Amino acid sequence: VRRCPKTSRKNPRAFDTVLLATYVVLFIRGHVAPKLPPDFHKPVSRTRSEMFSELGEFFKLHGHCNVPADWQANPELARWVYHQRAAKQRNNLTADQVRQMDEIGFAWNTNDGEWETMFAKLVEHLRPMHNEKPRDRVMDAQLRRWIVTQRQFKKNGELDAAREQKLNGIGFEWQPLSKQWLQMFELLSQYHSDHGHCRVPAKWAKNPKLASWVAVQRARKPAGKLSAKRVAALDSLGFSWSGRASSGKAWEAMFATLKQFRQENGHANVPQKYAANRKLGWWVSIQRRDRRKGKLDSQQTAQLDGIGFNWSPQSGGTPPDDAGWKAMLAALQAFKSEHGHCRVPGQWSWVRNQRAAKRYKRPIMAERAKRLDELGFVWTLIEPMSWEIMFATLVEFKKVHGHCNVPQKSRQHISVEQKRLGKWVNTQRTHYKRSTLRHDRKQQLDSIGFVWNLRPNLAPAR
């Protein structure tokens, strides 16, 4: 609200502006528009002491000072009361005048009376019947909006402490959704006790509300809308996050097939394209994917862990003492004993998997990397070489060939090192053309007769 000009009886327009500004402020702070008295802009003819006496008489008759804006019995008193609130808002009342009004319980905010009215409606709505059972009646829209407003005010720290205390005194529920969630969780706990699992059928006739609630929890978790505390509570019941048919009897049947595979083969690492049972191969892959996405419930995870299931076969297994991983480590030790290094040929996919597992910082490599380091394992096959090393290699090339024009491609066989040097030389020319080559490096290359443009008829692009 903008600052208004000084009011006076000679300037009624300015006086109206101040009252309208006050009306807006009261509306914003009270969130409910107060009624304006008829002819609210007109000044009061009687003195302040006379009007205060009138207000005292009103208080004796009604027990409060909330004079209705349209009170026909004394319109001037309604207008004066409104002016007092406006003057208080502008800090135009003295401390004695404010104290005088406070002593008779004057409500400076017109919403105080309205708040008490809505509070009384809430108390009546919550009042149980004579047999202590809750009343089965629908809450009217106005009271619902008022309740939502009180919760929002408290959340934003805008609710008066006295009002909050009154609401707490009647057992007001500040977070009804939390209470409802706990109630539904108790129902799910009971279902788990009765059935041994949390896989409530999608259209469970006995309690369709619970079935719907379970589906909502599954949808909220991958969307990041379910708190960690609630996820942990559901996990404690062995909650099934996937919700597919495979979570029930079909899952148990496939798990039994996997156990049979383990008994026959000594491990549970079924190939994805397992010719003898393609369905089992795909099922195993799905379990790994579901666990990675957080869709596999804790009970199923525990069952698979119990048979030594390999969650990350590409990294060589899961447990640090995995027999398969140890066997491959022993083979690597034998390779080093024979060749003197760990740079095994590319067909050793196990070696590639170890490098990938460390590159992606998989937790399992914390212990395994130490064992590989003890062998002198090479984590990066092509070590990055500095500019100075490549320049020295180019100098040696010139001593042998008499020039710096290192070919990248040739009909004759050239070594890997020479191919790499050729690419480096080409990179220097590219940097030069783009003006991104450092001046000192250009001088070094010029000192050995480096040719910047292999096509002399074309001027270099600068």
Image: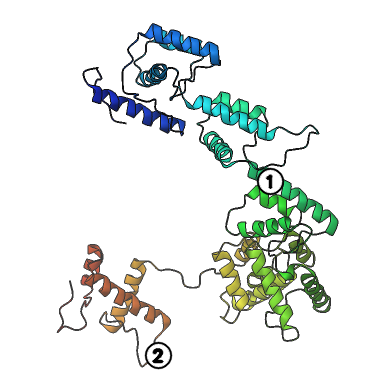
Viewport quadrant of the N terminus? top left
The C terminus sits in image quarter: bottom left
- Tell me, yes or no, whether the two marked residues, 1 and 2, touch with CB atoms within 8 Å: no
* Horizontal and vertical percent position of residue 322: 73, 67
Residue behind mark 2 = 413
From this viewpoint, is residue 180 visible? yes
* Element on which disc 2 rests: loop
> Nearer the viewer's eye, disc 1 or disc 2?
1
- Most foreground residue, 65 or 270: 65
Give 203 or 457, whichever is nearer the viewer: 203
Residue nearest the observer in this picture, 340 or 168 = 168
Q: Which secondary structure lies at badge 1?
A: helix
What's the residue at 66%, 27% (across, down)? 169
Residue at the disc numbered 1: 180
As drawn, 329 above or below 401: above
Side (left or right) of 91 relative to 458:
right
* Residue at the image point whose x is 62% and y is 52% from the top: 226
Q: Which percent across, then down, holds residue 353?
A: 60, 72
Would you say 266 lies left or right of 99 here?
Answer: right
Q: Is residue 276 above or below residue 282?
A: below
Residue 16 quadrant: top left
Structural crowding at the residue carrying mark 1, measured as other residues with C-alpha within 10 Å and reported as few (<14), some (14–19) or many (≥20): few
Is tag 1's residue or tag 2's residue first in the polypeptide sequence? 1
